Amino acid sequence: MTGSWMNIAGGIEPLDGVELDATLVEKIERAGIGAQPRINFYTPTFKSYATSELAGCGKSAWPAVSITGGECALACDHCKAKILEPMIPARTPEALWRVVNDQIAAGAQGMLLTGGSNRSNEVEYDTYYPVVRRIKNAFPAFKIALHTALVDESIAGRMEDAGIDAAMMDVIGAQDTISQVYHLKRSVADFERSLECLAATSMKVVPHIVIGLHYGRLLGEWEALEIVARHQPSALVLVVVMPFYAPAQRPFITPDARQVGQFFMNARRRLPDMPLLLGCARPPGRVKSEIDSYAVMAGLNGIAHPADGVVELAVRLGRDVRVTPACCSIAVGDEVMALERDSGMRVDLQDLITAERARPRATGKLAGIPIVTG
C-alpha cells in the first residue's frame, strides 16, 4: 500500500465522483483503527444484488419469517411495518413448523424469525417457543436468529431454553426517538435492561444501532454505543436509516455520510475487540459508496451488500479480504457465526484489479480478482 488513503480511494474507478471528507479520512488513517486485519463481505439475502465485483444469490439459505405476517401495532415512522410484508408469514406455531420444513427441503441453513410488535414493543412469541424447540431438536444444525424486541429476564430465558442461536434487538439511546419515531411509551432504560437480560443468556446477542433513526439526524447513537459497551454482546451491527415509508408530515433527511463515518470511527475506538458489522440497510447511490468507504477505513469487520469498488478499496488498504457469496446476511446474524471460523473466499493480494474493468460484469465471482478458498 502506497500513498494516502484519499489518493488510494481516488484511484479506484468505481469510486470516481465519491466525495470523501479528506480531514476525516486523514483522522481515521492517523488513528490506526483501520488496521483490523480481516474484513468479510457478504451478499444479501433479502434483495436482488450484483456489482462488478460480487454477484447476489437466492433467498433460500436464510429466509425471513414473520409470525404476524405484515402486521405491526407500532407502525414506526421509518418503517410503517413495510419491512415485514415480503417475509414468509407463519401466523400459527403449526404454520411455522410447515414453513421451516419446506425451507429446509429447499436448502435453507437457517432463518430470521421475527414479527410485528405490540404497543409495548414486544413480539408475542409465547406460543411459538415449543415449536422452536421442536425445530432445534429435529434439525440441530439449522440456525435460528430471533428479533427479540424488548424482553425481561423471564422472556430471555424462554428464548434461550427454546434453542435460539442469535438474539437481535435495536438499541435506542434517545428518549425523543423512542417517543416520536417509535410512538412508544418505553424508556432508554427499558432498552438497556433488555440487552442486559439477553447478554446474561448463552445465546449470541447481536444488537443493532440504526444510525440516523431520529428523522435522519444522529441523536441517541452515542448513548446506544455506551449501552452496548456496558454489556459486551457477541457483535454489533450498524445500519443507516432508509425511511422509504416515512410520513409526508414528518420526513426524514438522508443521514450525512461524514457523520456516519465519524460514528464508525467512534464505535471502533469504543469497541476495539468487538466484531462491528455494517448491515444491508443504508441509503442507495453515491452516499452508500461514501458510507461503505468509511466503514472499510474505520476497521469494520464485515459489510453486507458492498458498493461497487469497496472490495478493491479494502484490498488496496491492506485488509485481509474475504468474500462470502453464499446467502448469509448481516440481518440474520449468520455473519457472527462466520466470523468465528475461516470462512469465505480470500482475495489474492498478488493480482488485484486489471485495467479491464470495462468488460461485462461477472456473475458469481469477483470480476478480475483471482480468489482462493480459505
Image (tube, rainbow, N blue to C red):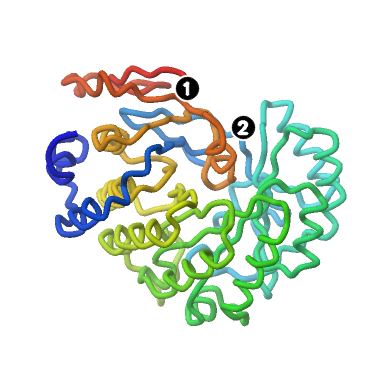
Locate residue 245 relative to residue 120 in the image: left or right. left
Rendered image quadrant of residue 249: bottom left
Amino acid type for the residue under numbered disc 1: Gly
How packed is label 2: few (under 14 Cα within 10 Å), some, or many (20 or more)? many
Check disc 1 and report the residue beneath it: 374
- Of residues 358 and 298, the one drawn nearer to the viewer in this rendering: 298
Tag 1's secondary structure? loop
At a point 25% along the width and 18% down the height, the residue shown is 351
What is the distance, in whole Å, between disc 2 and disc 1 at their CAs? 21 Å
- Mark 2 and mark 1 residues within 8 Å of each other at the beta carbon: no
- Of residues 249 and 30, the one drawn nearer to the viewer in this rendering: 30
At a point 74% along the width and 70% down the height, the residue shown is 152
Amino acid type for the residue under numbered disc 2: Ala
Locate residue 235 relative to residue 143 in the image: left or right. left
Q: Where residue 61 is drawn, which disc sits there?
A: 2
Locate residue 214 relative to residue 286 in the image: left or right. right
Determine whether 119 is above or below 70 in the image.
below
Q: Position of residue 8 (x, y in %)?
A: 16, 39
Q: Quadrant of the N terminus?
A: top left
Between tags 2 and 1, which lies in front?
A: 1
At a point 70% along the width and 48% down the height, the residue shown is 89
Q: Position of residue 175 (x, y in %)?
A: 51, 81
At a point 45% along the width and 56% down the height, the residue shown is 238
Q: Position of residue 236 (x, y in %)?
A: 51, 55
Total numbered labels? 2
How packed is label 1: few (under 14 Cα within 10 Å), some, or many (20 or more)? few
Q: Where residue 163 is drawn, which disc sits there?
A: none
